[in-house]
Image: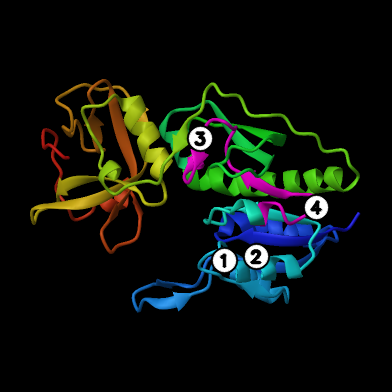
Amino acid sequence: MSLRTIFMGTPDFAVPTLSALLGHGHEIVACYSRAPAPAGRGMALRLSPVHQAAERFGIPVLTPSTLRTPEALDEFRSYQADVAIVVAYGMLLPKDILDVPPLGCLNLHASLLPRWRGAAPIQRAIMAGDPETGVAVMKMAEGLDTGPVGMVERLVIDPELNSGEAHEILARLGADLMVRALAALGRGGLSFREQSTEGVTYARKISNDECKIDWLASAQTIHDHIRGLAPFPGAYTMIDLGKGPERVKILRATITEGAGAPGQILDDALTIACGNGALRLLDLQRAGAKALPVDLFLRGVSLPAGQRIG
């Protein structure tokens, strides 16, 4: 059953869902996305990934700064949509908007709700060392990711999986899940259950301050921290490469044996002592340079055993 649909999303995570809905015959009557933002060295305005995709598909795009005006409500109503699909839109929907589509507003969220409500669920799940995550389709309510859940798809988190890799997997899983949810909704077969009030956690946005690696932590904790922040924004440490300490992102590492003062280089393969255990650094990136495997990174620099980083 084809449904008249308003799609609301902004980042690349949402694009597979938009494409999948179109591919399954749903009529996307309008796309809402965040307004173009300055990006790149020239800080030119850049359309969001969803905005770009919608234009390629010939879908009208709206980028309102607020949905809390009578004009915004009237415009939303004018599309006479059966349902609205929201995927990482980046703006809370007021109750007046939520009440417009007769079949409601469905949100695709990248966590196993109620764990990791909020802005950075994929990164937070990996940083916390969660054994699994997933995607959930919920019927939107006024609160932050508080609505009842209709369908869930789970993903076991491999011990070496980083947030970028999980992002790609979950985007594909989420697209398929939303297609199935919308099909069930169209035939009246999608039921919802209220979220538990226990186990609620919030995935706040990643701050610059928490990207710095604390070598006093255990090797496992630091490993999860690095995975959760890779490839963006990237966990970093300070290393003296011959001209004083500079910021270096650590994009991949592996847990290994070793002991020493936290932050101490233990060998010529760049094994670093942690508060408990050790990590061998595998992929590193200096500011303004491309990421390199450790063997190439070490060419031309001297990082002897015993030197401290941090």
Marks 4 and 2: in contact by CB < 8 Å? Answer: no
What is the number of the mark on residue 116? 3
Give the residue type at disc 1.
Thr
Q: Is residue 298 visible?
A: no
The boundaries of the magenta stretch are 97-122
Q: CA distance from mark 1 to mark 4?
A: 20 Å
Relative image position of residue 153 (x, y in whole percent)? 69, 35
Helix, strand or loop at mark 3: loop
Name the residue that disc number 2 marks.
73
Marks 2 and 1: in contact by CB < 8 Å? Answer: yes
Give the residue type at disc 4.
Pro
Residue 184 sits in quarter: top right
Residue 53 sits in quarter: bottom right
Q: Is residue 221 visible?
A: yes
Name the residue that disc number 4 marks.
102
Marks 3 and 1: in contact by CB < 8 Å? Answer: no
Marks 4 and 1: in contact by CB < 8 Å? Answer: no
